[in-house]
Image (cartoon, grey):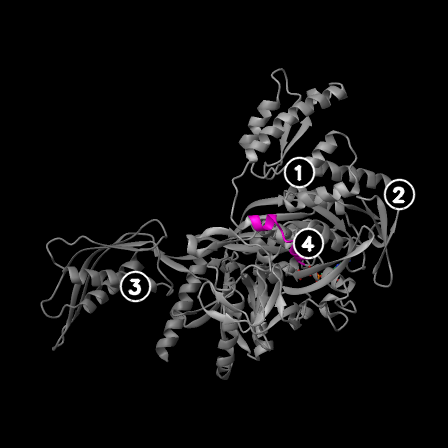
Amino acid sequence: MRTSKLSRSSLRVLESIVRPSRGAPFRFRGCQRCSSTAVLRPSSSAQKLPLDRRWQQRRGAAAAAAAILEEAQAEPESLAQETIIENLDPQEAARLSKVRNIGIAAHIDSGKTTATERVLFYTGRINAIHEVRGRDAVGAKMDSMELEREKGITIQSAATFCDWLKVENGKEEKYHINLIDTPGHIDFTIEVERALRVLDGAVMILCAVSGVQSQTTTVDRQMKRYNVPRITFVNKMDRMGANPFKAIDQINYKLKIHAAAVQVPVGVEDDFHGVVDLLTMTTLYAEGARGEKIVRKSEIPEEVRALAQERRAKLIETLADVDEEMANMFLDEVEPTDVQLRAAIRRATLSLKFTPVFMGSALADKFVQPMLDGVCDYLPNPSEVENTALDRRQNETPVKLIPYNSLPFVGLAFKLEESPFGQLTYIRVYQGALRKGLYVYNARTDKKIKINRIVRMHSNEMEEVSSVSAGEICAVFGVDCASGDTFTDGQLGYSMTSMFVPEPVISLSIKPKNSKDSANFSKAIARFQREDPTFRVHFDVESEQTIISGMGELHLEVYVERLRREYRVECETGAPQVAYRETMTEKVDFDHLFKKQTGGPGDFARVMGWLEPTGNLDGNSFEEQVVGGSIGEKYLSACDKGFHLACERGPLIGHKVLGLHMVVNDGATHMTDSSDQAFRTATQQAFRQAFVQGSPAVLEPLMKTVVTAPIEFQGNVVGLLNKRNAVIHDTEVGVDEFTVFADCSLGGMFGFSGNLRAATQGKGEFTMEFSRYERAPGQVQKELVQKYLKAQADRSKK
Ligand SMILES: Nc1nc2c(ncn2[C@@H]2O[C@H](COP(=O)(O)OP(=O)(O)OP(=O)(O)O)[C@@H](O)[C@H]2O)c(=O)[nH]1
């Protein structure tokens, strides 16, 4: 029975129906996350009844509930194409059932790249294992960029594919896996965002010592945003202090998704050498030089037998909370078989209510293969994921996309990359096959493009193919488009929604050191902008500088470094720029005469009125209250323009002015010498004079800042924030990490990432987003004014 359409109120109704008037022998337990699954549990009063009467009552209640639940879930027949998937062509069904499109996402340094390297080795895609950080002078396959190998971090997501031979009923079944390894740093979050937009499932990796960390929460949010089912791999089981069960508890309470172990470890830390498979209650050992051979033994070592029993019971109980069939078996006290358990885990994982937890150590070559089996067993194939497009020819009606090769082609370009052979566009094929020579249409621009070259990516290498089936991922050459564009074969007017793009938070000025590099500089900047929607560039007319903006200091640092390495352009970067604002705090009356009458055509304009603060920082406003026609209509609109022009560049430090209201209520006009220009100038001059008399103030942007670090660094981090005049609002102390929530001025936070790294041995992280403008402290204002006056004096000397 599907229960996805049930609301909380339906559950309440059902509860009242099955609850007899004299007491409450049974109660409904709704799923905590989605309120969708009804599980009958004996209430405490019912538990006192003899067992057979309790089951009788339960069956009666459940039957009543089942009838109503079924009625509540009756759904109207949906989209026309749905019938196709119901009568799935057996050949297509067989093909699709063996395809998995998955991503690996996790907090920084959890071991995503190390685990992916093992996946590639065990599936025969690579012949040798190389470690991240280029320790062996080669570096991990998926960190192909020189900078990635040097820094030991993933900057760009990398796609690859492999075939995994999984033993099913004593027979080897071949699964085709398209895999994307994503970066962990928040600065490169767009890479995770676009990968999850097009993937069907994910492996969430946690460190066995650190458990759920700040960036795990971010990727969890992203997986939820795109409804991506996930399995979990607790990595680094060889490390001192490894505790997979603590990590599982954290998934349950921090990420609010039901999680339970499907394995328990044999041996801990250095001695970690096996896992008990809780479904079959057998033990797995890794043999061979790189742990390539998994040996299954029916015997469970004595020292973990009790733990295995306990955790198997926990697995069943957790599944009973999210899966109806398992709930019934649980209440009937029927022990499920491994086949029934596998099916229940699959149902619960696909319905996004549960994540099965595997464990191992990628670096020690231990138990990555069972996790790969888990990808095949529990993550969806392309026909099990609902993907929709909007039909622009039918009033944007949503239509389901069916991953059939025989249907018209629909694909989404999710990533662009410059390669030595031209622009490479990564495409997820949602419907229809993509063939070489096919003409496709860009739904946004309506441009027709011929597909000349299709490749399958293997990190930075590629394999040319003549076609790619529906439901798969590939890359094409020579397609002019933007990230997020939909392609169709022209028969359909479909377009798909793009991914979420976060706003940049930090900017800095940049220019090439040598003017001869300008052309390369522009080329590189244009490319980076095309590839990365979170990297923005604009020319600031006030400072006459090129400003680049991004998700964090590391993000921008990486682009400056790439300019140097890939384009040989050395750049000068300014201190990161703060967008200050100016305002005044007191009302000032003005009466200003602008007069130049020295023979010939002159200038004459007199404006009177007042300038006052509005009390909010939404913008500026102009009002005329002239009676008696001392200034004509035409000149009043010149005054309005003059006021807004003056607000563009404040008198104090040359930044924009906010929160002012100007009223012009009188003045004088000369028969021949008055003009629009004269009134514009008079208003600008009146503004500048009034502004400096009205207790002007500099405003600075305040950033909502969240810092997370291991508890032992709490003192250091708080000290660091205090030094930067942060206002701390709240602190959350977890099991081994703490989080501080503070407001900080943007100017005060520059260079913070370096200081934080030093103060926390590289273990602290922070995120920052704009909150509001606030008056800058007196000293900051004084320094800014002095700097501005000096720059003006220097300019006038030139
Ligand atoms: N002890 C131990 N260390 C590991 C294990 N897996 C990875 N590491 C180490 O952890 C560090 C980070 O590994 P990566 O694979 O780069 O982690 P990542 O999650 O891909 O990193 P980012 O992409 O930069 O977020 C490296 O020094 C690895 O050698 C493991 O199972 N045990």
* Dot label at residue 303: 2
Q: Is residue 199 above or below residue 21?
A: below
Highlighted magenta segment, given as a residue range: 83-108
Residue 41 image point, x, y percent: 68, 28
* Dot label at residue 322: 1
Q: Name which of mark 3 and mark 1 comes first in the sequence.
A: 1
Pick the front one: 502 or 299: 299
Residue 264 image point, x, y percent: 80, 46
Q: Which residue is mark 3?
A: 646
Q: Name which of mark 4 and mark 1 comes first in the sequence.
A: 4
Residue lying farthest to the left in this orientation: 671
Q: Residue 362 vs residue 220: left or right?
A: right
Image quadrant for the N terminus? top right
Q: Residue at x 88, y 44 (%)?
A: 300
Q: Name which of mark 4 and mark 3 comes first in the sequence.
A: 4
Pick the front one: 420 or 701: 420
Mark 1 surroundings: few (<14), some (14-19) or many (≥20) residues within 10 A: many
* Label 3 vs label 1, nearer the camera: 1
Measured in 3D between alpha carbons, the distance from the residue under mark 3 to the one under mark 1, in whole angstroms, is 63 Å
Q: Is residue 258 above or below residue 233?
A: above
Residue 30 image point, x, y percent: 62, 33
Label 2 close to label 4 by CB (< 8 Å): no
Q: Residue 772 vs residue 258: left or right?
A: left
Measured in 3D between alpha carbons, the distance from the residue under mark 2 to the one under mark 4, in whole angstroms, is 39 Å
Measured in 3D between alpha carbons, the distance from the residue under mark 3 to the one under mark 2, in whole angstroms, is 79 Å
Q: Dot 3: what SS?
A: helix
Residue type at mark 1 is: Val
